[in-house]
Image (spheres, rainbow, N blue to C red):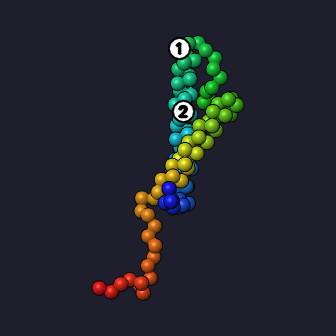
Amino acid sequence: MGEEIAKPTWLRIAAAVILGGVVGGILFLIVTLIIGAINNRMGMTIPINLQIAENVLSLCLLILLIGLSIAYFWWKVETTPPSEPATPEIPETEIPDE
């Protein structure tokens, strides 16, 4: 527990936000496809479709899925150490001669 986790770089954070947005959008498309299939087969009227400009519930679902995806990937970036750990710079005066 005494290990110090390196802070993520801005590039890893940006990648997490972009990936979260893309994955959240794809999840929204999958969820609306499933809900649409259920609506079609069962004759139900669940008010979720791809028309986010006209349907507030669909917009809320889209924002929720994108937000959760971004939060998940941000958490993964924060808890996963970088693949190349930062090595401390050693001045040449401290390198032993052999």
Q: Nearer the viewer, residue 2 or 74?
A: 2
- In this image, 79 relative to 97: left or right? right
- Residue 97 x, y percent position in the rendering: 33, 86
* Residue ID for mark 2: 29
Image quadrant for the C terminus?
A: bottom left
Q: Is residue 82 above or below residue 26?
A: below
Q: Nearer the viewer, residue 30 or 74?
A: 74
- Residue 21 x, y percent position in the rendering: 56, 44
Within-10-Å neighbours for mark 1: few <14, some 14–19, many 20+:
few
Does residue 93 show up?
yes
Q: Residue at x 53, y 53 (%)?
A: 78
- Residue 53 x, y percent position in the rendering: 68, 34
Q: Is residue 74 above or below residue 89?
A: above
The amino acid sitting under disc 1 is Arg
- In this image, 25 relative to 95: left or right? right
Q: Nearer the viewer, residue 81 or 70?
A: 81
Q: Residue at x 63, y 17 (%)?
A: 45
Q: Earlier in the sequence, mark 1 or mark 2?
A: 2
Instruction: Check disc 2 and report its element: helix, strand or loop.
Output: helix
Asked if disc 1 and disc 2 are in contact, CB closer than 8 Å, the reply is no
Instruction: Check disc 1 and report its element: helix, strand or loop.
Output: helix
Q: Residue at x 47, y 57 (%)?
A: 81
Mark linked to residue 41: 1
Within-10-Å neighbours for mark 2: few <14, some 14–19, many 20+:
some
- Residue 58 x, y percent position in the rendering: 64, 30
Does residue 11 show up?
no
- In this image, 97 relative to 20: left or right? left
Q: Nearer the viewer, residue 33 or 70?
A: 70
The amino acid sitting under disc 2 is Leu
